Amino acid sequence: MSDYIISIENLGKKYALRHATTTARYTALRDVITNKVGALFRPAKQEIARSEDFWALKDVSFEVKQGEVLGIIGRNGAGKSTLLKILSRITEPTRGRVTLRGRVSSLLEVGTGFHPELTGRENIYLNGAILGMTISEIRSKFDEIVAFAEIERFLDTPVKHYSSGMHVRLAFAVAAHLEPEVLIVDEVLAVGDAEFQKRCLGKMQDVAQSGRTVLFVSHQLNVISTLCRRCILLEAGSKKLDGPTNDVIAAYLSSTESVVSEWKGIATAALADASFSVTRFALVDEELQSLKQDIPGHSKFGVLIEGVIEEPTPLLTLGYAIYADNGQLLWWSLQTDTAEQCWPVLSRGPNRFISWIPQNMLNEGSYRFELIVSIHWSKWISQPMANAPSVSLQVRGGLSESPYWVEARPGVLAPVLPFIKL
């Protein structure tokens, strides 16, 4: 028997998109009235139906071994949910072949099948049965489900009186205690409050370590990198990449276009001054190449400033200001922040400066960097929020190695600082 519990060969799913058009042209009001009256005495004009084929999935093939936890990522509309619906037998493929061995359960819509008039206790049995659990399985897991959902006091209260948070907790608790051979999960860890999401992640880690096969779809790249060693990237319905999770996530981030990481000028531009004429302002990697993609929080990158000095002056101050996506200033950093003997030496001609941003400093989100160049207490050459060149950056994932942080952390920054027992 094959080692693969899931085998997918040339899978495709086609939808027919229909567009209705009419033969009628634009007419004046009098023509509309005339036509309406005339329509009483003649057959109605026929609409012309036009359709086009849309392939939500195209020739997707891969295999999954017993006990493997596979992540599936991609932009909205890439075909992720369509793939899971086919594997869950919710919809039929147009072509291709799917082979599944063992019992399959899906967590696609937590809370589907809950009845508002039934109590929490009754809905546990109802929802468990809908998800494929036997009565004996539900009974054996009942106390664990109730404890996980933290609804003991409201167990015999109709669900219609539950808050939305209680409803979500109970729904996930039932779904998370399934014990199939194959578990298909679609973005269910993005529910509830932060504390509950931590427990959800812990539960999914237990599932992943139990030897069960898991297919996991999520836009939360921290979750994918925590749970999955292997990952598939879907793009426009096709499999673009299949390999180690970190490599696939890096390729996914590199395909984004949210980075505008470099500004270039010339010595005769408006930012020209004898003490410093700006030629380049950029966010760069360790090889001093401009960033071409979104980056995880643990990446090392720097702020590069280049310019030409014709008349060196010790009063030259240069650096950058960084703003969060809501416009909040996070900090200024200048080459004159340290003791004077530590300042970079200025020389006539081209000069290049780099300021490395500490790893695991920035939280998830968008950031704007603005160039600062001035003559101390004298004049601005590049003034933030005025004439300063700016570059931008998106931080996604990589906030820490902790399993607790699956999305943006509370607060503006997200430093990872060691704790030492004294």
Image (cartoon, rainbow, N blue to C red):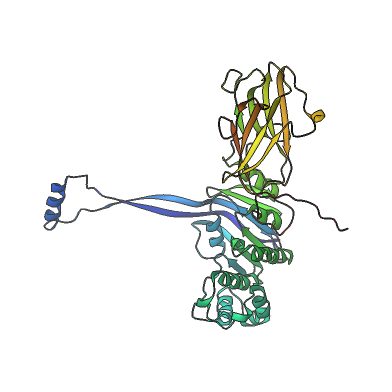
In the image, is residue 196 above or below residue 28? Answer: below
For the N terminus, the image quarter is bottom right
Dividing the picture into quarters, in which one does residue 388 lie?
top right
Residue shown at 13%/47% (left/top)? 30
Can residue 100 be seen at all in this image of the molecule? no
Give the x, y percent position of residue 142: 65, 80
Give the x, y percent position of residue 346: 75, 22
Dividing the picture into quarters, in which one does residue 287 lie?
top right
Would residue 410 be found to the left or right of residue 419 on screen? Answer: left
Give the x, y percent position of residue 29: 16, 47
Residue shown at 65%/47% (left/top)? 249
Q: How many marks?
A: 0
Residues 116 and 94: in front is 116
Dividing the picture into quarters, in which one does residue 421 lie?
bottom right
For the C terminus, the image quarter is bottom right
Would residue 54 be found to the left or right of residue 132 on screen? Answer: left
Give the x, y percent position of residue 298: 72, 46
Residue shown at 66%/44% (left/top)? 250
